Amino acid sequence: MTDVITRTSAEPATTPAPAGTSGQTPTAPRLVSPFERLGLRGRALRTANRLGVVAGVYLLITAVNLIGSGFKTATGDSAESLFAFASNPFVALMVGILFTAAAQSSSTTTSVTVGLVAGGLPIEIAIPMLLGANVGTTLTNTLVSLGAARDRVAFRRAFSAATVHDFFNLIAVAIFLPLELGFDVLERSSAWVADQTSGSDGGLFAAVFGGLGGVISAGTKPLSDAVKHGTELIPGAWHGIVMIALGVALILAVISFLGTLLKVLMVGRAATVLHAAIGRGPVSGVASGAAVTVMVQSSSTTTSLMIPLASSGAFSLREIYPFTVGANIGTTITALIAAFAFTGAEAEVALQAAYVHLLFNVYAALVIFCLPGIRELPLRAATWLGTVASINKLWAAAWVLGVFVLVPAALIGATVVW
């Protein structure tokens, strides 16, 4: 057993299993653009794909604006009382985990949270929700790893590679949530950065950043205003609720659409970055994970790309570990884009929420990787869990259901009842 654990966490990269042998990763199907299904080919298809990305970003910002306006319309000055059930930070954390696991996208959760903060959600409630998004997003690659369940060795590697991301994010939350509750580390630092990049007192950088935000907000405002006016016949708070629902639905659709287009456009380059950087040390791994995630706009996609490579033995768990940490950092770009939906005071609080997500992931990478004792914990925990799950698949089922569904739902339900 000791030999198995040691080889999983630190074994050198090996060549993938040859065709026809156990552990072979099947060739991935060719990615197809939505526009290709409409009959476009060649240059017209490439142009449509690029314009589709621009349109997707435009709709994402519009959707976030809708959520902010809808939340303000629905709650008036009672936003805090509406989220009183989540004033317990552990409940807010569980809300973030559960919503992200259900949506299968931390980008969706963070974008929605940015809109809610701009609409009046207190930042102290939003912060644990954003931390929860980091945990919830790891569900996707954990589910992907279950595809290797028929081969014990391949499954041990795959499940360990998936859950090293789980354990890193859980440890990060265990460190930074108490620090936040005691010292407001994330709230204070994000407020300072937001102040430097917005408003009139932040100097040249704030002027440039704020001006860009103003232009983007002005460009997207007509569409969000049109939706708002088109739903004005709906009475009272229901008007705001409908706007929030439309915004969330639009974000879900846009994130999926953007993910598909960016995979078509960038997955080849992302794979090149991945293969060139992994195995060259933790700094290179973190940087490549962040770069690939920015390219494809999805940490779930980025980390899921690693699972077949891990199950085949092409990369060791130790090589994959920093790559998944970089994916955490890269995925924060979506919330920053979403914050451009607002201007003025709303822009500053929206930016602060986005910076909370960014700073949390940067701090976590620095603290956990710079402290040797803590740095090894995700590796050891994932290696152990991968080993026991490969022997008895009930461990895998218990982990997935417990961490991502049962514990969050039970804590939220108990709080609401009490």
Image: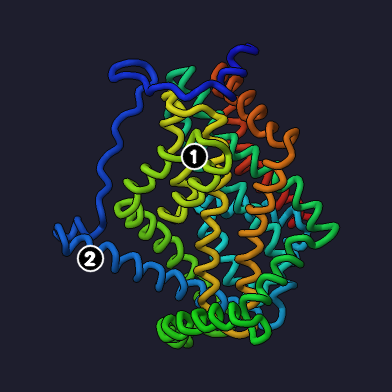
Q: Residue furthest right?
A: 182
Residue 47: give its label. 2
Give the residue at x 68% y 72%: 121
Give the residue at x 52% y 61%: 333
Circle 1: residue type: Asn
Residue 96: give its label. none
Can you say which quadrant of the picture contains the N terminus?
top right
Residue 141: give its label. 1
Drawn side of residue 52 relative to residue 306, left or right: left
Circle 2: residue type: Thr
Drawn side of residue 269 relative to residue 76, left or right: left
As measured in the structure, the alpha-carbon distance from the residue carrying label 2 to the one carrying label 1 is 31 Å
Residue 347 can be seen in this image: no
Give the residue at x 57% y 76%: 68
Q: Position of residue 41 (x, y in %)?
A: 14, 58
Of residues 83 and 55, the one drawn nearer to the viewer in this rendering:
55
Q: Tell me which corner region of the image, top left, top right, bottom left or bottom right, holds residue 384.
A: top right
Which is nearer the N-term, disc 2 or disc 1? 2
Q: Which colour scheme appears in the figure?
A: rainbow
Drawn side of residue 97 relative to residue 80, left or right: left
